[in-house]
Image (cartoon, rainbow, N blue to C red):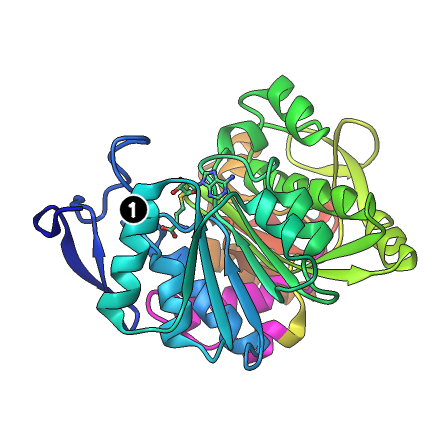
Amino acid sequence: MKDVEYVTIKEGRTTLLVPPHQEGKGPKGIGDEVFFNPAMELNRDISIAFLRAWGVDGKKVLDGMSATGVRGVRIANETDAQEVVMLDLYQEAVDMINKNIEHSGVRADVRKESIEGHMLNNRYKYDYVDIDPFGTPVPYFPSAARFVSRGGIVAVTATDTAVLCGTYKQKCLRRYSAIPKNNWCCHEIGLRILIGYCAREAARYGRGAVPILSYYDGHHFRTYLKINESAAEADASLDELRTYKFSNYSWKEGAGTGPLWGGSLFHEDILNDLKPAGSLDDDLIDTWVSESTLPPFFYDTNVLGSIVGKSPPRLKKMISAMKRSSHRTTRTHFSPTAFKTDADPETVLEIFKDL
Ligand SMILES: C[S@@+](CC[C@H](N)C(=O)[O-])C[C@H]1O[C@@H](n2cnc3c(N)ncnc32)[C@H](O)[C@@H]1O
């Protein structure tokens, strides 16, 4: 590996060597060099904030798909994790990770191994397993859900957003055994289909999977799942699965879309302890906190506007009007023009019309 081909970057409190990339642009391509995507900095910042909030002192962390090692090295450098192990299938990546371990002076191990095989050979060793694949996590989640420690966390990224959001409906059915819906709510539906899949998969091994922090960000979904041991926990997770029927601006339980996770996307203990880190700021944390106690899905002012045939008011104005009518209402991280509320669809439309 030639040093001259790599550039030095700083993410969080860590300096690292990565392949050349354009600032703010995604990866150059798969296969030609070790993968590094600067656009995933927020994803990595959130994993640091999550581990600090969850409390990782004395815990063992697996960065199961490590590429340059940026996430694992940051975890070793920026959290109290007792042990950090990084994996990648390819020798180029393993060399790069070793270089980054040396460059940043952290204590961590690296292995050229698949996450599936490593989990099978290290049953119940890890308290936190990070799955950050190209595209879908479906091939990797089962071994992590099955063999993470009891009460441990499996953090899952999915970048196959077009599948989960319903552009490729049949593919979603094949991959996630769920029917998506390509409408204004597709990002929340996609995230919930991903979590629903994880809950069903964990249940196969007699384990419950409960999301404690889940979000959508531009081109990926991410969920941090607490894996609880016991058939009762598995059944409790399965009890949270729902199907919904969507109409032109609203929805109700019924056949059509799903099955998907119908429970909360967050756990308040994590949200209460979450502190800003890098590009994760108070604004995003506050939005998660305010939407975390509201039911699934949201209304989009543009969709309501096209139904009623008028230009939509500013979001702030709509939210204030909803609150004046005593309905819990808040913005949502899923869309800058949308709001979540506990009001029924007819009430929402009436208030919208009157604005
Ligand atoms: C999207 S990249 C990971 C990015 C990295 N986590 C980050 O934050 O920059 C996915 C990596 O997983 C590796 N990979 C693919 N299949 C794997 C497997 N079965 N086990 C472990 N690593 C794998 C690829 O070589 C690639 O480097």
- Quarter containing ligand 1? top left
Q: Label 1 sits on what residue type?
A: Phe
**Image side of residue 24 versus residue 138, left or right:** left
Which residue appears farthest toward the right when viewing the image? 232
Question: In the rendered image, is residue 79 in sight?
Answer: yes
Q: Is residue 2 above or below residue 42?
A: above
**Image side of residue 271 versus residue 179, left or right:** left
Find disc 1 in the rendering and name its residue.
36
Measured as percent of width and height from the top left, residue 128 is found at: 59, 63
Q: Can residue 61 be found in the magenta stretch?
A: no
**Residue at (53, 23) in percent of width and height:** 167
**Image side of residue 147 versus residue 100, left or right:** right
Please rate how many residues cluster around mark 1, counting C-alpha atoms within 10 Å: few if below 14, some from 14 to 19, many from 20. Answer: many
**Residue at (48, 47) in percent of width and height:** 132
Measured as percent of width and height from the top left, residue 341 is found at: 66, 56
Which residue appears farthest toward the left when viewing the image? 4
In depth, the one of 105 and 303 nearer the eye is 105
Q: Is residue 87 above or below residue 219?
A: below
Question: In the rendered image, is residue 35 in sight?
Answer: no
**Residue at (84, 47) in percent of width and height:** 238
Q: Quadrant of residue 290?
A: bottom right
**Residue at (30, 58) in percent of width and height:** 98
Q: Identify the element where label 1 is drawn.
A: loop
Is the residue indicated by label 1 positioned so its CB lies within 8 Å of ligand 1? Answer: yes
Q: Is residue 281 above or below residue 123?
A: below
Q: Can residue 285 be found in the magenta stretch?
A: yes
Question: Magenta span covers which residues?
Answer: 270-295
